[in-house]
Image: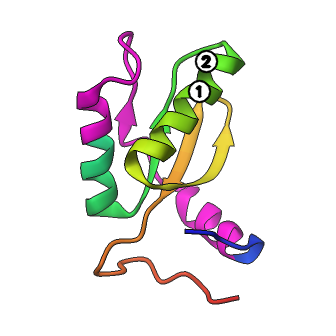
């Protein structure tokens, strides 16, 4: 799903008060973690993920893999926190058209 700037700003505002739902551990991005992210996206649509790594390249690879594996859209990355969005059939979050 491609989001324009206004839609991303709207989602950032909604994500501001959220707590991280998924925390990556020492094992990194495993199949179980991807399944948990997928489950959380189905339930919430907009989630925060904590990625505890100092290496920028590793973090970028993890973020890319999460987006690819879960078919989600990256909304924002601040420090070690990633915000992603994937709309479900119920469309729990109504994003503005333009």
The quarter holding residue 96 reads: bottom right
Q: Nearer the viewer, residue 43 or 89?
A: 89
Residue found at x 70% / y 20%: 56
The crowding category of the residue bearing disc 2, from other C-alpha atoms within 10 Å (few below 14, some 14 to 19, many at least 20), is few
Residue at the bottom extreme of this rendering? 97
Q: Is residue 28 magenta?
A: yes
Question: In this rendering, would 59 be left or right of 51?
Answer: right
What colour scheme was applied to this rendering of the protein?
Answer: rainbow
Above or below residue 62? Residue 45 is below
Q: Which residues fall within the magenta stretch?
A: 7-35
Kindly identify which numbered label has been placed on residue 43. none
Give x and y (percent) for residue 95.
55, 81
Residue at the right extreme of this rendering? 5
Residue found at x 51% / y 26%: 51
Q: CA distance from mark 1 to mark 2?
A: 5 Å
Question: In this rendering, would 4 be left or right of 74?
Answer: right
Q: Secondary structure at mark 1?
A: helix
Q: Nearer the viewer, residue 25 or 14?
A: 25
User: Which quadrant does the N terminus fall into?
Assistant: bottom right
Kindly identify which numbered label has been placed on residue 58. 2
- Verify CB contact (< 8 Å) between mark 1 and mark 2: yes
Residue found at x 47% / y 83%: 94
Residue found at x 34% / y 56%: 41
Give x and y (percent) for residue 89.
29, 79
User: Which quadrant does the C terminus fall into?
Assistant: bottom right
The crowding category of the residue bearing disc 1, from other C-alpha atoms within 10 Å (few below 14, some 14 to 19, many at least 20), is few
Q: Secondary structure at mark 2?
A: helix
Above or below residue 71? Residue 58 is above
Kindly identify which numbered label has been placed on residue 61. 1
The quarter holding residue 80 reads: top right
């Amino acid at each position: 799903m491609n989001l324009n700037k206004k839609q991303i700003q709207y989602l950032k505002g909604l994500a501001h008060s959220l707590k991280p739902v998924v925390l990556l551990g020492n094992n990194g991005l495993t199949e179980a973690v991807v399944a948990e992210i997928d489950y959380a996206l189905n339930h919430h649509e907009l989630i925060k993920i904590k990625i505890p790594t100092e290496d920028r390249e590793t973090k970028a690879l993890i973020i890319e893999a999460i987006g690819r594996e879960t078919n989600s859209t990256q909304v924002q990355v601040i420090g070690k926190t990633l915000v992603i969005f994937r709309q479900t059939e119920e469309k729990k979050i109504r994003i503005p058209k333009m």
